[in-house]
Amino acid sequence: MTENAADGDADVVGMWVTADGHIRQELRADGRYDEARGSRDSAYTGRYTVTGNHIDYVDDSGFTATGDIRDGVLYHEHLVLYRGESQA
């Protein structure tokens, strides 16, 4: 896992994808995320913050979620995502 030397928070920026490619979550450097599901682009959008290896999400519709990076894998609620490219 890459760490941001300035603050010790995990480097999460980039594309995260489920093993089957169905869910694709782009974590952008500006603190925003865009999650695609199947053929539905931008199914969920919002903002996120990183503290250490923990991610807090706030969707634009108001719901919240969390995630954790362990051994280079993103565990986001019930999802398991890996660094990768969009399959779309």
Image: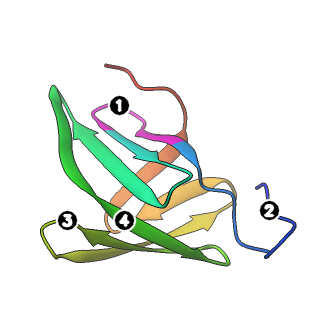
Look at discs 3 and 1 and give the one toward the viewer.
3
Question: In the rendered view of the protein, which quadrant contains the N terminus?
Answer: bottom right
- Which label's residue is closer to the chain start, 2 or 1? 2
Within 10 Å of disc 3 (Cα), the crowding (few <14, some 14-19, many 20+) is few
Disc sitting over residue 60 in the figure = 3
Give the labeled residue for mark 2: 3
- Rendered view: 69 above or below 34: below
Amino acid type, residue under disc 2 in the picture: Glu
| Front position in the image: 5 or 1 | 5
Q: Label 3 is placed on what type of residue? A: Asp
Q: Which class describes the residues within 10 Å of circle 4: few (<14), some (14-19), or many (20+)? A: some
Q: Which SS class for mark 1?
A: loop
The answer to whether residue 57 is above or below residue 43 is below
**Residue located beneath label 1 in the image:** 20
Identity, as a three-letter code, of the amino acid under mark 4: Arg
Determine which of the numbered discs, if any, sits on residue 47 in the image: 4
